[in-house]
Structure formats: structure tokens, C-alpha cells
Image (cartoon, rainbow, N blue to C red):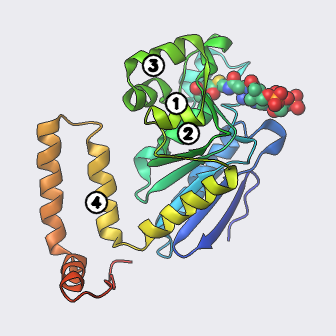
Amino acid sequence: EANYEFLKVSTPRAGVGLIEIHRPKALNALFTPLIAELNACLKAFDRDPSVGAIVLTGSHKAFAAGADIKEMSTKSFADAYGTDFIESWSELPNTFKKPVISAVNGHALGGGCELAMMGDILYCSKTANFGQPEIKLGVIPGAGGSQRLTRAIGKAKAMDLILTGDNFSGEKAYEWGLAAKVFDTPDECVDGALATAEKIAGYSRIAVKAAKEVVNKSQDLGIREGVEYERRVFHSLFGSEDQKIGMKAFAEKKKAEWVHR
Ligand code: CAA
């Protein structure tokens, strides 16, 4: 078991990895050492055959209050560009194959909102406070916010939010389709995310991996290419034992015992 300074890591349910961002002094503000730990931890879960899905959360007070403004404030253009500042954050959506559920309570601002949106599923509670306030700091979102928020809720609302820096509630996130579910309390939100992760972890790993892959393709491809891509991946699953097992179990009214676990 690796020891992390800024993360609390556990496996609270069968097949489920839980990562809690833990930097309470700075409301979980995200800085390079924390992101390095997060990437290392996700990599470890991605390789761990006992884990099928991952929940990423913060505290009740803050999922993450943004990129660390103190770390950023003195950077020059050459520092930012030269080190590809924030590029390491993009490992999360592009590198990890297992589903990650973001469970958002409290502040999810700037980089915190962007990190939450990098998850494959986003759940939140009514306490969630989302926003892209970078404009107030003289900058713009830098970890995908302008792209992912716009895809999720549409240009009209995303432009309004990013140009004003106004925050929005967990209920609005749900109403606008950014969050898949909204819960009354933070504990219910984390429990709900863990229950969903456990359910996903109970399916064939091969099918889950393919399902995540094809849904993500919809963000990059046109509808026709996307549908063709989906069909090819669908065909390929007829080469997995789990397709035989799942369909046979249905016919025999039994529970499927997956081999790809
Ligand atoms: N970076 C660094 N430190 C932060 C921080 C951040 N993003 N957010 C909070 N903190 C620190 C505060 O400085 C404070 O530290 P001290 O006790 O040492 O003063 C501590 O966390 C607690 O914060 P507050 O006292 O401000 O708590 P609050 O409850 O009064 O307010 C808040 C909460 C409204 C979230 C407020 O902290 C805030 O506005 N934070 C900044 C939010 C923000 O602008 N985020 C976007 C950052 S830019 C970005 O993320 C760029 C990108 O796209 C990648």
C-alpha cells in the first residue's frame, strides 16, 4: 500500500477504489505534487485486478477549490509554457481505462470543477458549489473547462458562466445535465457513487472497458463514424467469453459468473 500525503485511499466495497483528496488547509487546492499523487494512485488502481471502478471525492467542504493560486501566481509565460503547466492533469481522462466517478461536495471551482468533469460520471450533492472563476484572476480555464463545460451544458450557459465567473449549485449542475445525479447530503453522494462503482465493478471488465471507450468516442467523432466505431467494438465483444457467459446465463435464468474480472 502506497502512502500518500494529499490523498486518502481505500477499497471500501467489493471491486471499488476510493480516492479522497485531502489537503484540508487549502480547501483541496490542486498543485503539482497532489496531481502527481493522484496520477500515481489512479495508475495503481488501473493496474489492480481487484478494482473495477474508482470513486474520486474531496471533503464535505471542498471537492477542490481550484488550482493552487499561490503556486501559480509567480509563474512566467516561459515557466507555464516551458513546463507544459497543467498538462499532467490531462492524464486522468486520457490514460485510465477503468471508470472514474466524481462525487462532488462543497466547492468545485476552477481546476476543481475541471477535475470533476474529467471523471466518467459526475455525481454531486446539493452542497456542491461549481464554477469557473478564472476570469476573476485575469486568466481563463486551463484544464479543459471551456471545452468540457460547453459540451456538457451547451454554449449559451457555458459562455455566460465562464465570462462572468459566477458559481452554480449542485441542483443546477443536475438540472443542466452536468451531473448524472444530485443527492441531498454529502454522505449520500459518496454512498451513491460507491454503490454505482460497486455495480459497475460487478460486470464483465471487458464489457465495461468497451462501454467507456465507445461513449468517450462520441465526444470526438461525428455521429456516423461514432456509430460505425461502436458497431465494430460491439462485434469484437463476440470474441470474449463473457458474451457467451452473459447471454447463456440470461437464457438459463442464472447469475452470470464473468471470467473477465
Ligand atoms: N489556491 C490556493 N489556496 C486556496 C485556494 C486556491 N485555489 N482556495 C482556497 N485556498 C486557501 C485559502 O487561501 C485559505 O488559506 P489560508 O487559511 O492560509 O488563508 C484556505 O484555503 C481556506 O480558504 P478561505 O479562507 O478562502 O475559505 P472560505 O470558506 O472563506 O472561502 C472559497 C472558500 C470561496 C472557495 C475561497 O477560498 C476561494 O474563492 N478560493 C479560490 C477559488 C478560485 O478562484 N479557484 C480557481 C483557481 S484558478 C484555476 O483553477 C485555474 C485552472 O483552470 C486550472
Mark closer to the chain start, 3 or 1: 1
Residue 101 x/y as whole percent: 51, 53
The residues bearing labels 1 and 4 have C-alpha atoms spaced at a distance of: 26 Å
Q: Quick check: 199 above or below 134? A: below
Residue at the (84%, 40%) spot, across then down: 25
**Sequence-wise, which precedes: disc 3 or disc 2?**
2
Measured along the vertical axis of the image, is residue 158 above or below residue 197? above
What's under tag 3, amino acid-wise?
A: Lys
Given residues 163 and 19, the one toward you in this image is 163
Decide if residue 97 is on the left or right side of residue 214.
right
Label 1 vs 4, first from the N-terminus: 1
Residue for point 49% across, 63% down: 197
Is residue 187 visible to us here?
yes
Q: Is residue 69 visible?
A: no
Specify which label sits upstream in the sequence, 2 or 1. Answer: 2
Give the Cα distance between marks 3 and 1.
19 Å
The nearer-to-camera label among 1 and 4 is 4
Q: Mark 1 points at which residue?
A: 143
Label 1 CA crowd tier, 10 Å (few <14, some 14–19, many 20+): many
